[in-house]
């Protein structure tokens, strides 16, 4: 009785009038779309894990302005006395201190990253298999319900 009820409810939910339309509507059903989103999520996770393998280069710059002369780095009094006596030695004092640089980072230990990539690939293949199984299960339900309907129609005649 439950299968017979599903046979009459499913076509109206999917706006289908023939079995072929029902099979086509299953491919755009919400459960199928959810399965596709899970596959896409696994693909994004794989791409994010692969992106961690690439080196990163960051450029930075900063400008600090002070009202009085300021030391860029702290200097011991004995060294600053030598600088004051000998004017050929550059003194690291200024009102404007400009800092620029480059930061380069690259992963050294990639075992955890490769494990994440493998996990994402496994999730992706699992999601694809689940989508296929769900689609086949729903198609089998349609075929079985149709067979029951045909049997009941033949029983009546």
Image: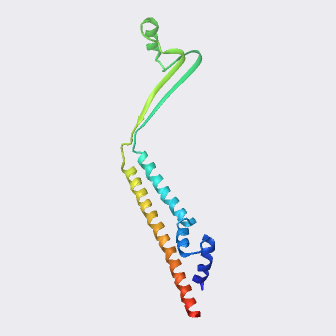
Q: Nearer the viewer, residue 124 or 101?
A: 124
Relative to 18, is 56 above or below? above
145 over 120 or under it: above or below: below
Q: Residue at x 55, y 72 (%)?
A: 22
Q: Is residue 122 above or below residue 141?
A: above
Picture coordinates of residue 147 (x, y %)? 52, 84
What percent of the width, then of the height, locates residue 81?
A: 46, 10
The quadrant the N terminus occupies is bottom right
Q: Quadrant of the C terminus?
A: bottom right
Q: Residue at x 56, y 22 (%)?
A: 64
x then y, percent, for residue 34 = 54, 62
Task: Residue 154: give x, y in percent of width and height.
Answer: 55, 91
User: For this rendering, which residue is in front, 96 or 45?
Assistant: 45
Query: Coloured how?
Result: rainbow
Q: Specify the quadrant of the image occupied by residue 123.
A: bottom left
Query: Tag count in the figure?
Result: 0
Q: Nearer the viewer, residue 18 or 23?
A: 18
Q: Quadrant of residue 86?
A: top left
């Amino acid at each position: 009785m439950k299968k017979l009820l599903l046979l009459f409810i499913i076509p109206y939910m999917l706006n289908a009038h023939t079995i072929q339309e029902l099979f086509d509507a299953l491919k755009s059903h919400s459960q199928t779309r959810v399965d596709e989103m899970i596959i896409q999520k696994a693909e994004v996770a794989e791409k994010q894990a692969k992106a961690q393998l690439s080196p990163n280069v960051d450029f930075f710059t900063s400008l600090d302005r002070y009202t009085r002369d300021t030391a860029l780095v702290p200097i011991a009094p004995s060294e600053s006395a030598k600088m004051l006596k000998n004017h050929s030695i550059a003194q690291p004092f200024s009102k404007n201190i400009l800092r620029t640089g480059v930061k380069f980072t690259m992963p050294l230990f990639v075992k955890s990253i490769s494990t994440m990539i493998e996990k994402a690939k496994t999730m992706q293949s699992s999601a694809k298999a689940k989508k296929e199984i769900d689609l086949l299960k729903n198609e089998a339900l349609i075929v079985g319900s149709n067979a029951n309907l045909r049997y009941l129609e033949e029983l009546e005649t």
